[in-house]
Every structure is written in structure tokens, then in C-alpha cells.
Image (cartoon, grey):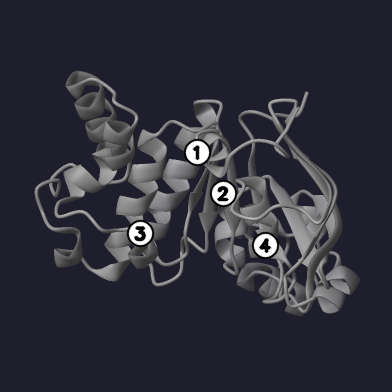
Amino acid sequence: MAYLELKNVSYVYPNGYTAVEDVSMAFKEGEAAAIIGQNGAGKTTTVKLMNGLLRPSKGEILVEGESTENKTTASIARKVGYVFQNPDDQIFQESIYKEIAYGLVKQKMSHEEVKRRDLEAARLCGLEEDLEEHPYNLPYSKRKFITIAAIVAMDPKVVILDEPTAGQDRASIQLLGDIVHKLAEKNKIVITITHDMEFVVKYFKRVIVMAEKKVRRDGGPREIFWDEELLRFSSLKQPYLCQLANLLGYRDILTIDELLEVDL
């Protein structure tokens, strides 16, 4: 049974613009999925509908089998956590420890539980040495991990990451991938919006393509990134390694090891 499900969901902004139209998707516990598509495809609107920041104009969203229609945004967010693309939209505390702890304190958890969760989330996100620092003493790229830690500490079943690799170096992207895997191993659902196709290929087994406000395909990275008609329609590019394999006349290649194994 799906933990999170969107059933024929549409959303129309107050100005009359339809951002998503008849979107359906479902996610099971322990699943990591990437949602890809060009700007305007409806990705961000879709995930904001998932956690109650927006409410569907049509259709239904179910969390743990229950409709979110009459649920408060706060109650949905306890189960479906959303990490904004820009960390500065979330950060406002005077230390990283307090930033991660803020939601826990608001829920009146014990000091011991707050500390345990804070340190655990900080370790996951590579921040354990920085907890007493002011968040804005850290570079923008590392501030993203503060906001991830703050959401993870709240222990939602679903963690949504909006463009997490933007502005990140290779080591940080590796850390992001490790976070995705560790959360999935803890039976969390991780949903990522990204334009980074290399990140998708390396860390996600499920890819959802959105274009022109709708879901166009939902499948594994191999079938998605070698569906050239789909990529053209969606204005998406193959990952660089797939492009190289294509130039060499090979198909269905996803990794460097696969490319090295073919008889060049």
C-alpha cells in the first residue's frame, strides 16, 4: 500500500494559471524517487501539494491512506517534510544547533530527545563540528545541509528535497547521495526535484518525468534516459555518459563500468 498518493490532482493558481493537470503518482515506504522536467513542468507545485503548502483544485491527496483535505498544513508537514531550494527561506536561528532543534522544541520534546535528534541529524548532514556556529557563517552550499538536517530531525516519513545539488561541489553531492540512501534504508520516502541528471542516474531507481503540467513517464533511469522521443518532448538531455555512449553507437548504457565492458 502506498504511504503517499496523488489521485488525478490539478492545481490552478489564483490568477487562473493551471500549474499541474490530472497528476497521479504513489510512493511506498523506503522508496527514493526523482522528479525531473524543465521549468514550468509543474514539479515544484506538485511537491508543495504533497505537504499541504498548496491545496489541490481538483483530485485527492492521501497520506497514510487518509485524505489531506481537512488536515492542517502543520499536521501534514509532520509526515511530509519539505526542504526548500533556497536555504535562506528557512534559516532564522542564531546557531545551527538551534536551527535544527527549533521544530523539536516547538513540539515540546524533552531536552534529551531534542539533543539526541539534533546530533543525529547533524551527523547525517556533516554538521556535527559546526553546531555552535551561526548558520550564516557557513557558505550557501553548506547552509542547504542545515535545512535538510532541520527537516530530518523532525522525523517525517517523507522528505522532499527541492534542487539539492544546485551550487554543490562533488563531495557535497556525494554526501547528498549518502543521505538519500540512508533515509531510504530507514524506510523513509525521499522525493527529489532536480535538473542534475548525473545525480538522478547515480542515486535513484525511480524517475518521474513531468512536462507541460503532466506526468509523461514513470520508470527506471535506463528506460527514461534512453527514451529519446520522451526526452525531446520534455526538453530534457541525457546524462553525459549516455550522450557519450550514444555518440559511440551504443545504447542502454548508464554507468562508466557498463561502457568499459562493451567492445569498443
| Label drawn at residue 181 | 1
How packed mark 1 is, by other alpha carbons closer than 10 Å (few <14, some 14-19, many 20 or more), is: some
Task: Give the mark nearer the N terminus: 3 vs 2.
Answer: 3
Look at the image and tell me in which quarter the C terminus lies: bottom right
Q: Are marks 4 and 3 in contact (CB under 8 Å)?
A: no
How packed mark 4 is, by other alpha carbons closer than 10 Å (few <14, some 14-19, many 20 or more), is: many
Where residue 58 sits in the image (x, y, percent)? 85, 53
User: Circle 4 sits on which residue?
Assistant: 45
Where residue 233 sits in the image (x, y, percent)? 87, 76
Q: Amino acid at mark 1?
A: His
Q: In the picture provided, is 238 more to the left or to the right than 161?
A: right
Mark nearest the camera among 1 and 3 is 3
**Structural distance between the alpha carbons of marks 1 and 2:** 8 Å
Q: Are marks 4 and 2 in contact (CB under 8 Å)?
A: no
Residue 140 vs 215, above or below: the answer is below
Q: Are marks 1 and 2 in contact (CB under 8 Å)?
A: yes
- The residue lying toward the viewer, choosing from 134 and 128, is 134
- The residue lying toward the viewer, choosing from 90 and 133, is 90
Task: Give the mark nearer the N terminus: 1 vs 3.
Answer: 3
Task: Give the mark nearer the N terminus: 1 vs 2.
Answer: 1
User: Circle 3 sits on which residue?
Assistant: 144
Name the residue rendered at 81%, 68% in the picture. 213
**Structural distance between the alpha carbons of marks 1 and 3:** 18 Å
Task: Give the mark nearer the N terminus: 4 vs 2.
Answer: 4
| Label drawn at residue 203 | 2
Q: Amino acid at mark 3?
A: Lys
Residue 238 vs 162, above or below: the answer is below
Task: Give the mark nearer the N terminus: 4 vs 3.
Answer: 4
Quadrant position of residue 73:
top right
Callout 1 secondary element? helix
Name the residue rendered at 83%, 73% in the picture. 212
